[in-house]
C-alpha cells in the first residue's frame, strides 16, 4: 500500500491526489531553487527574507522564523547570520525590552525580495485558468488539508489580522494604532494588520 505504487493509485483516488501533492511540492522546490540560485542565495535564505518582509515587525523573531521554516532556532540563527554578513538584513535590540532582538531588511534585502517574490507565479498562472467556482472549491479543500497539516505540526501558515478571530477593528478610532488584538493584547496600526502573524487563528 503505497502512493508510489501505480496499481494502488488506480484503485485509490486519495493516493492519486497525494502523489499529485508530491509533484506540486517538487515543482515549488525547483522554482525556489532557480530563483535563489539567481540571487546567489539558498532557498532557506530566500524564505527568511520573504518572512521578514511580510510579517508584522514584532512577530519577526528567530523562534517564529524557525516555526515557519520547520527547523530549529539554531539553524535559523545560522541563516540570519549569513544574511547579515551579506548585508541584506540587520538586527536591532528592542528599546523597551533589551532581551528582544528585531530583524529588519536593509535596502539590499528589499531589492532581493522584489526579485524573488514572484515565486509561485508559474503555479498561480495555471490556477487562474480555472473557473471562479473551481478556484473556490480548490481553495476550500486545500485550506482543509493545510489546517490538518498545521494541527499535526507539519507546516506553519500565518495570515493577516482582518481574517483572524482575535481581531477587533477600530477599538480606538482616530488613534495611530486603532485596532486591537484580543489574543496578544496589543494595539495594531493599519500597516500592522496587513502583515502576516504567526498567532493567527481562524476560529
Ligand atoms: S493573533 Fe490575530 S488579531 Fe492578533 S495580531 Fe495575530 S492575526 Fe492579528
Image (cartoon, rainbow, N blue to C red):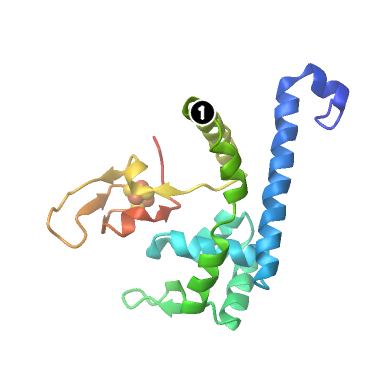
Location of the N terminus (image quadrant): top right
Name the residue at 33% across, 39% down: 165
Q: Quadrant of residue 125?
A: top right
Near-viewer residue (95 or 194): 194
Q: Is 33 rendered above or below residue 25?
A: below
Residue 103 location, x and y as percent? 47, 72
> From where the camera sits, is residue 184 visible?
yes
Q: Residue at x 59, y 46 (%)?
A: 155
Mark 1 Cα-neighbour bin, 10 Å: few <14, some 14–19, many ≥20: few
Kind of element beneath mark 1: loop
Above or below, comparing residue 165 to residue 135 in the picture: below
Q: Is residue 90 visible?
A: no
9 in relation to 107, above or below:
above
- Residue in the image at 52% along x and 34% along y: 143
Return the x and y of residue 196 as percentages of the image width and height.
Answer: 42, 53
**Residue 22 appears in which quarter of the rendering?**
top right
Number of callouts: 1
180 over 72 or under it: above or below: above
Instruction: Choose between 121 and 1: the one closer to the eye.
Output: 121
* Residue 99 locus on image (x, y percent): 42, 74
* Residue at x-position 63% and y-position 77%: 82
**Relative image position of residue 158 (x, y in whole percent):** 47, 49
198 left or right of 152?
left
Q: Horizontally, is 184 left or right of 41 in the view?
A: left
Residue identified by numbered label 1 = 131
The residue furthest left is 174
Amino acid at each position: 500500500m503505497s502512493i508510489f505504487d501505480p496499481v494502488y493509485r488506480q484503485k485509490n483516488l486519495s493516493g492519486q491526489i497525494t502523489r499529485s501533492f508530491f509533484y506540486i511540492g517538487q515543482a515549488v522546490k525547483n522554482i525556489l531553487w532557480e530563483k535563489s540560485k539567481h540571487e546567489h542565495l539558498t532557498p532557506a535564505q530566500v524564505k527568511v527574507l520573504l518572512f521578514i518582509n511580510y510579517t508584522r515587525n514584532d512577530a519577526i523573531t528567530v523562534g517564529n522564523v524557525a516555526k515557519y521554516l520547520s527547523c530549529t532556532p539554531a539553524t535559523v540563527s545560522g541563516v540570519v547570520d549569513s544574511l547579515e554578513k551579506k548585508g541584506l538584513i540587520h538586527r536591532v535590540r528592542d528599546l523597551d525590552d533589551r532581551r528582544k532582538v528585531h530583524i529588519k531588511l536593509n535596502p539590499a534585502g528589499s531589492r532581493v525580495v522584489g526579485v524573488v517574490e514572484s515565486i509561485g507565479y508559474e503555479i498561480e498562472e495555471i490556477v487562474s485558468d480555472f473557473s471562479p467556482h473551481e478556484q473556490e472549491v480548490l481553495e476550500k479543500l486545500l485550506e482543509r488539508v493545510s489546517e490538518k497539516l498545521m494541527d499535526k505540526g507539519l507546516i506553519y501558515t500565518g495570515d493577516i489580522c482582518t481574517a483572524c478571530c482575535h481581531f477587533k477593528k477600530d477599538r480606538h478610532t482616530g488613534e495611530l494604532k486603532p485596532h486591537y488584538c484580543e489574543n496578544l493584547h496589543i494595539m495594531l496600526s493599519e500597516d500592522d494588520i496587513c502583515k502576516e502573524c504567526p498567532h493567527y487563528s481562524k476560529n
